Image (cartoon, grey):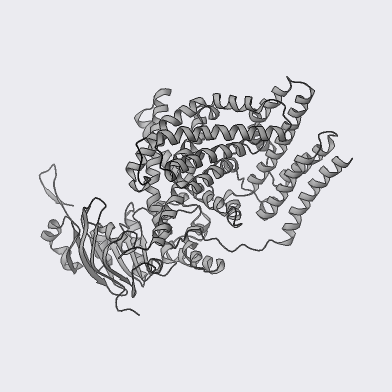
Amino acid sequence: MALTALEATHLSYSYADGASALRQISFSIAHGERVALLGPNGAGKSTLLWCLVGVLRAEGTIAVGGTVLRPGTEAEIRTKLGLAFAEPEDQLFMPTVKRDVTFGLLAAGVSSQEATQAAEQTIRNVGLPEGTLERAAHELSSGERRRAALASILVMNPVVLALDEPTNSLDARGRASLAGILLQLPCAQLIATHDLEFARALCARALVLMNGELVADTPMAAFLEDTNSLQRYGLIASLRTDDGQTRVL
Amino acid sequence: MVRGASDRDVLSRARELALAGLLGALGLLLPIGFHALGWGGQVFLPMHLPVVVAGFLVSPATAVSLGIVVPFLSSALTGMPPLAPPVAPLMALELTAKAGAASVLYRTLRLPMWVALPAAVVADWAVLALAVSLAAGFFAIKASPFQYAWAAILIGLPGTILQLVAVPAAVLATERRVPRLRPRKRHGTG
Amino acid sequence: MPHHLDLYLKRESTLHRLDPRAKMLAVAGFIVAVLLAPMHPTWPMGALLVLLICAAALARIPVRLMCRRVLSLAVVIGMPFLLSRLGGEATRAAGEQFAARSLLVAAVFLVLMASTRAIVLLEVAERPPLISVFGQLGEFILRGVDLLVEEVMRTNRAWALRAPTATVRVRLAGLTQASMSLISRAAARSERIGAAMVLRGFQGKLPTATPTPLPWSHMAAGVAFALASLCVAGLGRWR
């Protein structure tokens, strides 16, 4: 087994108009480790995730489970690194949940029977009820859609699970339920999020992006106590309310 | 790191399929919307709008496939246009000709939109006239098929005008939003 | 598992349980029979109508619903028929032929769609190599309909709040603008959906499940219906 689950070395990416989105980002994640990817809007979190799965071409080196991303290894990388989108609707593109969840396995040549069994097990693992596979995605609530999208990735047993803003539109119970599912998973996780409490509950380490640069790679607990750093990196902001008090958001 | 051509092709194919699916879905929904507002489908040709737009945004093969699938799928899901009498097959021929011509002229031959769109409309009329004359022979209908085709063209004139106005606007707006969809080396603006 | 657009009628019936491939075979045979059956004598068309009614009864389709669905085609079938009455004998005969055959073919499709989910038919259509691209595209369109209906409902609610007494002209402008906005948003969305497909292993063609073997009893039922229809048509022509 490779020493690290995910390794990124000197990653840089620029948009078509030349604007730099990522600059010389290097980090690694060990097997089973959960790392939060923090940063304000526009920091480059989503761009970094897209580069890791090879949809955007970045300069530098990316290795997942020992496989280096290069022409010809994209499919293998994408099997090992699963990415959960911020909008689960974009990942539920088939008419039924079953077709979505079995898609990856069938594409990999697994038999229908095995794919269906694996899909049923994964659906149970993410806390969705028995009949979910036969339903259409639009019949699910937003929390259920997120879990169905997650199931479509977890069924492939990825080495690393990357999540982009996983708590979007989830209420407190939904967030707690999702956290419970993620805590059970053995794979390494890279969680891009604005939700500091969610990050605190799940991750022992934080990578902080700002303007496309990795400005901090630090233990989570101490980092979240440092309000000056949090404010400097745009992760919290102050608000003066009507009663003259200053609140932190 | 350079992503291989095959991976880029696969990604492009996936995006094209997804786009065709969404535009095809609009081709099913717009007629329902128009009917709900009491605006005749045969007059405003609402199914044609998104399929013709798709012709300008996807490859000829996908455009032709979409032209075939949309009327039949609409018939299967809503009952309209009907399979018998063969309105759905005739519409499939029309849409295939129109969307396919648009794609070939605009994306393959890189002709400007003000040439490609009218040419696609004319291709549609030509195929309609030919298809009706063949169908008339099959059903032993003695009336002139050209009269039917001419009547269909006249009745659908408001829809044709709508397409000539709305399609370029929709295509240009989409190309601005997703620059990747522009055909390379444009010869002129639409 | 209802999709936003589907003629499927949820029932527990023999026809609903029948394998879709057998049903498609039966429908194909029936359509050929309708096209071959003579108009005179009238008994072959009558016999085909009886077969159709039996199929509808097997599917437990309510009579009223069936009539309503067939009547929705009244304009498309009725207008040419009525116009043909103004012509000579040959034109009137052609009009009768047109109406009778169109009604039967339309009705058998309605029975098929009422007893079979559209998604199931699309999955069958994905397997034969020549037409698999149509089945694939159909599946994407079906999902696209569900996605867009939700988006249209959201837009409609916003529209109702913003312009509850809009005139027809304003509604037309709004519908056109909304369609154009939907088109460009669909394009942006397709970029993400395409990426999602590739991330899940898409290699140019949608993966399909291995088809289950067609049970011989289902095949026999489909073949029997098709043969019965063809025999009726054949006997009518021969006599």
- Image coordinates for residue B114, horizontal then vertical, percent: 40, 33
Q: Is residue C22 above or below residue A7?
A: above
From the viewer's perspective, tell me whether residue C166 is left or right of residue C235: left
The residue at the far right in this view is: C239
The residue at the far top in this view is: C86
From the viewer's perspective, tell me whether residue B156 is left or right of residue B106: right
Residue drawn at the location 51% of the way across and 68% of the way down: A109
Whether residue C178 can be seen here: no
- Image coordinates for residue C116, horizontal then vertical, percent: 63, 49
Whether residue A213 can be seen here: yes
Q: Who is closer to the viewer here, C220 or C66?
A: C220
Task: Find residue A186 and report its image quarter.
Answer: bottom left
- Image coordinates for residue C229, horizontal then vertical, percent: 79, 46
Q: How many marks?
A: 0
From the viewer's perspective, tell me whether residue A46 is left or right of residue C164: left
Task: Find residue A221 and report its image quarter.
Answer: bottom left
Q: Is residue A244 above or below residue C196?
A: above
- Image coordinates for residue B43, horizontal then vertical, percent: 53, 27
Residue drawn at the location 36% of the way across and 45% of the way down: B182
The quadrant the C terminus of chain C occupies is top right
